[in-house]
Image (cartoon, rainbow, N blue to C red):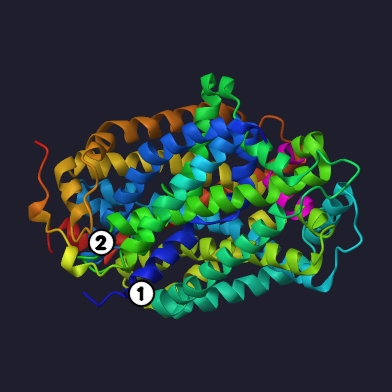
Amino acid sequence: MTAMGWVFMIVSWSILSFFTGWCIVKILQPTTKQSISPDEVPHTN
Amino acid sequence: MSERAKWGTRIGLILAMAGNATGLGNYLRFPVQAAQNGGGAFMIPYFCALIFLAMPLMWCEWAMGRMGGAQGHGTTPGIFQILWRHPLAKYVGIFGVLLPVAVGFYYIYVQSWTLAYTFFAVTGQYTGITTQVGMSNFLSEFQGIHSSLGVSGLAYAFFLITMVINSYILYAGVQRGVERVANWGMPVLIVLSVLLAIRVLTLGAPDPAIPEHNVWNGMGFIWNPDFSRLGDAKVWLAAAGQIFFTLSVGFGMIQVYASYMKEKDDIVVSGFSTTMINEWGEVVLGGTIAIPVAYAFFGPQGTVTVAQSGAFNLGFATMPLVLQHMPWSLLLGTAWFFLLFIAGTLSQLALTFPLITFLEDELKWSHKKAVVATCSLVFLAAHVPILGLKAGALDEIDFWAGTFGVSLFAFVEIVIFIWLFSPEKAWDEMHKGAQVHIPRLFLWVLKYVTPLYLLVLFVVWSIQQGPSVLTMAGIAPEHIPWRWVSRCLLVAFAGALIWAVYKSPALREKKAGKP
């Protein structure tokens, strides 16, 4: 495998592993205290 | 309105959704697509499609489903009627039931092959076959495509066993059936994939006389970037197609599972998690198993041939051949086919569930009656792709439902949700109970980029494949009747759904303006 092949593989794996890990942390957090009311969501226009 | 079923836990829902998305495409289609379309450079259009096509569509489908479920409608006929007050809305929505169930007509047969091959691996049925041709012949003989009926007794027996397993899980319902299977099935699938990936990565060069034929050069076959390919529109389309199919968006079945959520359950993180679990499984695990190991045994030319022979051949002919050359071949072969069986089962359950939900919600049938009707229909309709396998009945259904239908339906559903329902209301709906905010950029993406992306995909795929499929160009004359039977099956099913929507008491109430 070329050096660029390694770069693409490691970057892709890292991005996906980071976000998958972030999701696991968020899933394990209780949601009720952090819920955002729809009233708090600003409209765009 | 009777109480609808609910998911027991958030993790159960996410695993069921991820199981819906994770299928044979993760392990077989992705590595072939990456290898054929620029290697590492393929990941640039792949991630673009993930961000601008799949994620927005995923959040839309979750939001539509949860919103519909809160009002007693888990499938798109009812959901579209809520979003778009037009007499046609509920009839447009039938495609969200037609498309997944039609794909389920043939997918159950493929699922049964994975079960059969798990049995073959355990009992060593294909041990001793040493060539690709020999393994392909083994597959053909098992399928019985050269027999007078077009199916062997053994293949039919495994189809029946698979049918019984699926029916039992569907009858058990959302929480005790699908969720329970996802709760153990997905972890087992991930563990088996990790074990196989570790075994492949530690394989080295199987033939010491040819050290360059090793797994890491096989990884290079997928990852070495060819930047010149980025100027080719086909590579961008292939990446968008892979993302589209792997996440199972555009079928209408994500809405069905999401309709069993509670009204204030988060969908932003849950939808994102489903996507990430599927993507991690596809890129990190799926990209590490089949093609690298094929490269280590067959070298670059052999791997090109394998990649060009298609995903089914890679899964059912190349992989068993390669795995039996490795230590612990029995165990590895069993692990490979059992993980495909789990992935196939979770996908098939999701493909079938929309009809059950439709019959319960819109025709007010009991769960038992809806399951019996759905499983009977799938059982009968599956005989078209089974008996017409050699004639390409499976490919015919796959084009109309799995390619043409989903790309058109995905475009229609995003137009209804974002433009006809209104972008602001859709944005608010996505954020009900949200654990985190979606970046504001995505509202603009949802309004313009995703619909345009989908429209381009639909037009290009239709132009590329439509005329030849429509005119049956290159199809042997003796195969044409089965092609027509497949089309008639789809038209008859669509007609039955239109009639059911027309007669639906729940949808009539809506028309009369009742809550």
Compared with residue B108, is residue B480 higher up or lower down, i.e. above or below?
A: above
Relative image position of residue B125 (x, y in whole percent): 85, 67
Query: In the drawing, does residue B463 fall left or right of residue B24?
Result: left
Chain identifier of the residue bearing label 2 in the image: B
- Residue B458 in sight in this render: yes
The label number, if any, that marks residue B266 in the structure image? 2
**Can residue B312 be seen from the camera position used here?**
no
Q: Nearer the viewer, residue B191 or B258?
A: B191
| Labels 2, 1: front one | 2
Mark 1: secondary structure? loop
Is B149 situated left or right of B247 in this image? Answer: right
Circle 1 residue: B365
Looking at the picture, which amino acid does disc 1 mark?
Trp
Locate the N terminus of chain B and report the quarter of the image it occupies.
bottom left
Quadrant into which the C terminus of chain B falls: bottom left
Q: Residue at x 67, y 52 (%)?
A: B289
User: Does residue B315 belong to the magenta stretch?
Assistant: yes
Chain under disc 1: B
The percent coordinates of residue B67 (x first, y second) are 23, 59
**Residue B333 x/y as whole percent:** 75, 64
Residue under the point 29% across and 52% down: B90
Task: Give the residue at x 51% y 48%.
Answer: B246
Numbered range of the magenta stretch: B306-318
Identify the main secondary structure in magenta: helix
Q: Are marks 2 and 1 on the same chain?
A: yes
Type of amino acid under label 2: Asp
Q: Residues within 10 Å of mark 1 (few under 14, many from 20)?
A: some
